[in-house]
Amino acid sequence: MKARLAALSAEALARIAAVEDAAALEQVEQTLLGRKGELSTLMRGIGDLPPEERGPFGQAVNAAKQALAEALEERRGEFAEVALRAELGDVRFDPSEPAPPSVRGHLHPITLVRREVERIFTGLGFDIEDGPEVESEAYNFDMLNIPAHHPARDMQDTFWLESGQVLRTHTSCVQLRAMQEREGRLPIRVIAPGRVFRNEQQDATHEHTFHQVEGLMIDRGVSVADMKGVLAMFLSRLFGAAVEIRLRPSYFPFVEPGFELDMRRADDPGGEWIELMGCGLVHPHVLRAGGVDPEEASGFAFGIGLDRVVMMRYGIDDIRWMMSGDPRFLRQF
Amino acid sequence: MYLSFNWLADHVDLSGLTPAEVGEAMTMRTALVEGIHDQAAALEGVMVGEVSSCEKHPNADTLSVCKVAWGGDEPARVVCGAPNVAVGQKIFYAPVGTRLPNGVKLRKAKIRGEPSEGMICAEDELGLGPEHDGILVLDPGLAPGTPLADVPGYADVIFEVDNKSVTHRPDLWGHRGFARELAAVFGRELLPLALADDLVAGDHGPSITLEDPAGCPLYAGLCLEDQPHAAPDWMRFRLAACGMRPIDHLVDLSNYVMLELGQPTHPFDRDLLGGDAIVVRRAEAGETLVTLDDETRKLQREDLVIADGEQGVALAGIMGSAAAEVSGATRRVFLESASFDGPGVRRSSSRLGLRTEALARFEKCLDPALVEEAVRRYAHLLRRISPEARVETTFRVAGAAAAPETRVALDGDMVRARLGTDVADETIAATLASIGFGVTSTGSSGFEVAVPSWRATRDVSIPEDLVEEVGRLVGYDVIPTPDPTGPLRLSGKDSLAVTEDALRDRLAGSDAYMEVVGYSMVPDGVLGRLGFPADIALARLRNPLQKGASALRPAVVPGVIARLEVWLRADADVRVFELGRGYHLDAQGDVSESRELVVLRATAATVDSRELVRELRGTADDALAVLARGACRYVTGSPSPTEPWLHPRRTASVLLGDQVVGRIGAIAPQTLAALDVTGQAALLVLDLAALEACPVVPPAYRPVSRFPPARMDLAFIAPYELTTAEIEAAMRAGGPKTLVEVQPFDVYRGKPLEETERSVAFHLVFQAGDRTLKDSEVNKARDKIVRTVEQLGARLR
């Protein structure tokens, strides 16, 4: 038995030494040390020995087991080392192999830009208001200093409802609602994003349904300079670069004086001026209609087209994409 | 509106200023110039030539072969088709290589076998006028080779002014008004206007009766004798450049005076005026008038008519009629110049859908002082261009009108406060004076400002109007751009808008939905196809862009699902949402709005629509969880008639507490068929106002246990009448306190189960806060839960 043990140990050590990879080593370990392994089989023969030999033989088997375990461990370590080195040296890698499709949704670009506008004005202490899309003639026109039979009504082609109401042609109606809601409490600082409508045929630059953000700031002593300050800050943040602005005289019945605001990047002093929005000091008739005393307070208002900003920002060439619902367009945002 | 640089220069000295500078000044100080068209630049290369020989073309009767001396060594050989070409004429010669305004680039050519190098030009070929009957014949004193740009009276620079920006300015509808502005801006003199000052008001000519002094308070009529002929080229070219077609000198002069002063006039053939009388009156019931455009207009009482002794001859302030039109046979003319009520003529024009250049001016409320000025200007110009004309030196004037005498008290401090910059009192006074305001100091920065008649009809009446005058003329660029200041205050946001944005983030985030924005209008055809009840009154447009598209959407759904087929063609899986408004007629007939979220889930695959609804339900759970309005429930219920697109048996109400906040369900098979869709689709609709009315329930914190949980899955086979929600509720009710979570997670339908039942699997978690649960405890609880559920009619799978 002892001789068999010695032979077995020697042969086992030789097999361990000869193994070439970790899997084979595992195999060898099973055949040697497993429950049905060769050493266990040998150990089971211990009962055949005379009692006095059983002790020493058992110890010898254990010693052999120990030696084999150590040899196995050593080889395992070697293989692990080799595997590690192999993995660290493996150059078979391509980061641009196709990924499984990502799952994400898309917000409409109008939403993205609207939120940016909101974030900027929230930082300046402006409230974000909302108003109805179906308006009365009074809110859309009369109280905004656009009386019936005034040529200014032609400036906006209007959708009239059978009810005598209109689809609002601008978000300026929210100026009145915001003033009235606050019952003359100052300061009033409000922006109102929303959908507006014009009864005109569609083409690449005209939509009958589009989006505006109205702005209104009223307090004691608010001036054109204050307006320029707020709008320059707003536009610089919105376009991500300091901008230069200029005002041109223009006519909107609900402001006096009224302006068209042009913008260009401050780092491009020779650049083209881009016409961006209408603005002005709120007309005293409008202040009164909103319950604000024009002797006490003054303010400015502006209206900017969101679709236009979206188009500028992303270089979109046709406004009709906005309402198209076309996934090829919407997935890009 | 178009303005001619040369014409402006007749009224104000523009020497030393380029058209670009003048255009910039108009844009920055007065009104937007949208474009500047330099005719000379467009005609580069065209020069004066002399026809040195002219022979008949050998192969064509109507053509000539000419030699044109143009200052070079060799005269050019040009084939010309004009009947009026003759030796010795000075003409405009366009050599080979010239690009004409119509885009044609001239090349060497052979015309009927004869070589031709360039062209002898007619006015239309140069883009100067409409005539094509003959070539332009120039002043014989011009030297060949002189560029067209250097020949006075031909090439002009034309400004295109944005009409909208002068809606409020009756004084800016002619060259004179802009000249006045430019004089102020550049500090130059407004040149005097030459008028026939010898004319005096008297009683020569047809009698004039004003029956409606409110509609027409002032009417002047001048009689003259002349034969129509072509106006001189310079006048015809100015008219053409400003968008008016030259006709004959009598009509052209009327248009010329209008484009110059802003006051429309109208020449009648006096011999065609019945009864030698003019009556300005309201139209009679049923009266019709054939206007110059050959349309028969049905008039109403509100329309103002110019009539002779027998019939209507013009629609006041809008358009003349054919009845007394000036023609080639005209020998005696009656020229009308009048003041009409702006809103009145505008009303008629809107109703009749007839807008003209005259109306565009009258509706702005013109200065009545222009009425006589226009007569005198017409007479002056007529004598200049038609020496044969005989102008009566007395003209009739009926009625009287003047712009209101408006005086505005202006405070210099108020001007400074509004503009936000320091403008000295003297500057304020000088600036206002420069454009015709009368300024009187009333002490300590106070002024009394008299508004000139041409600004007083409607435009300027309050101090704010004067702030604008000062600001724009001083230049808005002097106003600083300070950082914003104001009291600190928290920003608020409309709560519905907050909810909408939270839903957007949720849906476009982990739920991977795509936001769309759709129109508020919905074609009747779409509603019909979807089975929307025809007897429900919809909010409708009175003036839709297209016939059949007058309805406003009664809900957001139709517009969304109408696109389903297109979306499914692009993608096998559709996940789309829209936040928008529905429009409803209330009991009073007014239109009100609802705010809705519509989520559409669809697939081209053949699936059980219940599976799609189940998936969408998960999305609904998520979205509502974000809003923290408490636990939501889904209760089976039939769709209402206004939701014909929902499946009658696979639709449920979404409830928060007892409040119905929306609907979820499969799209009905007949709707899918109507939409030409193969596949399945499900809808979630939330009513945001109802949702918003539910109180916010912040999530309750449960202490985290240090002891391990015991988990198990149980599946029950249950008939459809027994809902998952009921089983779940029974489990919670029948389970011990240590049952901390019940989560249904899977459904199985199909063999070997009956078709009336399905299996639902639940994940259960038991956990105590103070100890590790024993197996026996958990098993006992499990048995009790199973018994409880089985009593409801389910069996453990």
Image: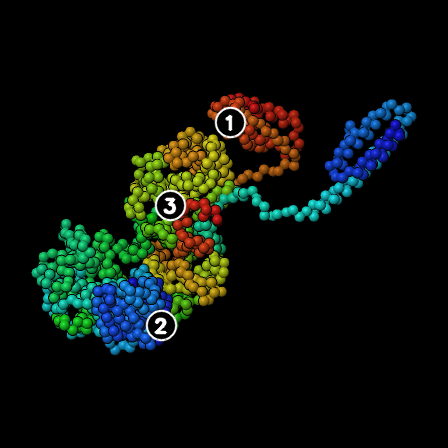
**Which circle's residue, 1 or 3, is located before the other in the chain?**
3
Which residue corresponds to mark 1? B749
> Between B241 and B704, which is closer to the camera in this rendering?
B241
The Cα atoms of the two marked residues, 2 and 1, are separated by 84 Å
Q: Residue at x 15, y 60 (%)?
A: B325
Tag 1: amino acid: Arg
Q: Are marks 1 and 3 on the same chain?
A: yes
Residue B782 is situated, as x and y percent measured from the top left of the image, at 60, 26
Q: Residue at x 42, y 63 (%)?
A: A273
Are the residues at dot 1 and dot 3 in contact (C-beta closer than 8 Å)?
no
At x 14%, y 50%, the residue is B285
Q: Closest to the observer: B671 or B118?
A: B118
Q: Is residue B106 above or below residue B620?
A: below
Note whether residue B693 is visible: no
The numbered dot on residue B18 is 2
Can you tell which quarter of the image residue B416 is in? bottom left
In the depicted structure, whether residue B73 falls above or below residue B662: below
Image quarter hosting the C terminus of chain B: top right
Judge from the rendering whether residue B693 lies leftward or rightward of residue B323; answer left or right: right
Which residue, as the protein is rendered here, is positioned at the far right? A52
Chain letter for mark 2, please: B
Residue beneath disc 3: B519
Q: Identify the colour scheme used.
A: rainbow
Question: What secondary structure is marked by label 2?
Answer: loop
Mark 3 vs mark 2: same chain? yes
Query: Which mark sits nearer the N-terminus, 2 or 1?
Result: 2
User: Gap between marks 3 and 2, in whole Å?
Assistant: 48 Å
Mark nearer the N terminus (3 vs 2): 2
Residues flagged by tags 2 and 1 on a common chain = yes
